[in-house]
Image (cartoon, rainbow, N blue to C red):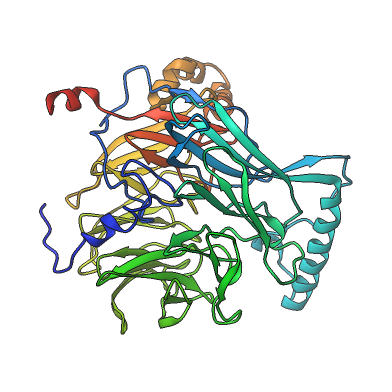
Amino acid sequence: MKHSLTYSFAVAAVLFSATSNAADWNQWRGPNRDGVAPSSPPLITALPRMGLKPIWTSEEIPAGNDGGWGSPVVSESTAADGSIQQRVYLFAHQRLKLRDLEPRKFPWLPPGKRVGMTDKEYAEYEVKRRNEDEARGKAFKFLETVYCLDAANGKTVWKNEQSSLYTRFPQSGSPTVVDGRIYFLGAGRHVRCLNAGTGKKIWNVRLPGNFRDEFWQSSFVVVEGAAIFLAGHLIGLDTENGKTLWEGDPRKTRGTHASPVVWSDGGQQFVIVNVAGNQTICVEPGTGKELWRITSEANLSTPIVVGNRLITYGNSRKKGMRCFKISRAGAEHVWTFNGAADKGSSPVVVDGFAYVQGDKRLACVDIETGKAAWSTTLDFRRPQYTSLIAADGKVIYALEGMLCFKATSESFEPLIEAKMDETGLLGSEDFFRVKLGLNKLESEPGGLAKAEKLFEQKIGRHGPLPCATPAIADGKLFVRLKKGIVCYDLRDRAVASRTR
């Protein structure tokens, strides 16, 4: 279905053209921060009969509570010998146990276990829990490590390791690589800038302000010499030396995990970011001057700018996914789609349609009208936080395996629905059932329970790290697992050879 739009998409494709290679995925959500690879070779539309093996697996890299949930990025950089090489970068906030711990007295309570507690009692419980967590943190040593891997073979090129601090959850922002420099936010209000080729420190600054155990997952956007991010509130630093250029009002621009994006209008660039729990603002990158502010009901997700349209996404169906028509004068609400919601996942827009997941739903929404072209149910246990990405007219969702479907408004057309084993092998559920002999096992007395246990052990517990989002560059997919990064070659060589 060919879709005609009344606004331009051309701007988004050149936002970062001066600072990143077309094949790079040099920051959170890609070069244009919209989840779309601006150029891609043809990708496969089905798995090989015997599954798809990763072309490489990295060294072991701690993740989750032991290393964070940051996403990999990919960028060309100048190596120590002067050659240009494609590298994969990942930030991990690691904790190393120094001594054994006593059982918790105040574990986290899910909503279902707070029955009978008043709001005041639960607030008092949370204070005790936070105090206990901070005390338990003294049983660990904390490190911040930036990994640089060779994108061709996954071997570690260098590691930059610094001592770090305890936070309630590990720091999990993704690094940003621009003009040969890596920018990332560490624990304790420390901001670091490294040489992307060597890993050597360029500068390291501690932001002013108090710190206890706060964790902020915002990733930098770099524009016009300013590195802009959220660390409790919106801040802009000088990329040359890390000095503060400006700070937003701590109350009006407060925020923790959302990442800013760039919007270009009439040759000028502006920064758009979700702040204050339910608002979105547009500021000048050099000064932080606010152009406009709207109530978007977005929070932790990253907004998307497509031409003169702004897409935001909230954490409840009432807040929904919203579209605004933007100009320097302000933003006008166009529509709200209430068919999905997610705590932190961001949608992806391809050819005028937004693909959004949330509440175990996946929908294709016309961004001109806000109407769903189609929707379907996702067969996942807890689909949340992980964002959709797109390349070659296909959308990829890496959670509990990999889902790849055609970016079309006609209907939901899944191309690949794969699970993953401990080696990183991608295959269909039927493929692994045969491989593990589950059909035969289920026919035996008591075999159904044994088969379910075996499948969970060999397949179910493996897969992409929840909350992390893969990178895709030049037809290769880079996925963070619980113990490292794997790379898959998704290029369809048969199609590529026919189009030469």
Q: Residue at position x 37%, y 43% from top? A: 24
Locate residue 174 relative to residue 477 in the image: left or right. Answer: right
Locate residue 246 relative to residue 21 in the image: left or right. Answer: right
Nearer to the camera, 315 or 135: 135
Pinpoint residue 126: horizontal percent, then vertical percent.
Answer: 76, 67
Q: Is residue 272 visible?
A: yes
Q: Quadrant of residue 255?
A: bottom right
Q: Residue at position x 11%, y 52% from top? A: 1
Pinpoint residue 487: horizontal percent, then vertical percent.
Answer: 44, 30
Q: Is residue 303 visible?
A: no
Locate residue 289 relative to residue 254 in the image: left or right. Answer: left
Q: How many marks?
A: 0
Q: Residue at position x 68%, y 54% from top? A: 169
* Picture layout, residue 398 above or below residue 173: above
Locate residue 171 relative to residue 13 in the image: left or right. Answer: right
Quadrant, the C terminus: top left
* Picture layout, residue 42 above or below residue 190: above
Pinpoint residue 121: horizontal percent, then vertical percent.
Answer: 78, 74
Q: Residue at position x 33%, y 40% from top? A: 23
Nearer to the camera, 31 or 111: 31
Nearer to the camera, 238 or 121: 238
Pinpoint residue 292: horizontal percent, then vertical percent.
Answer: 39, 83
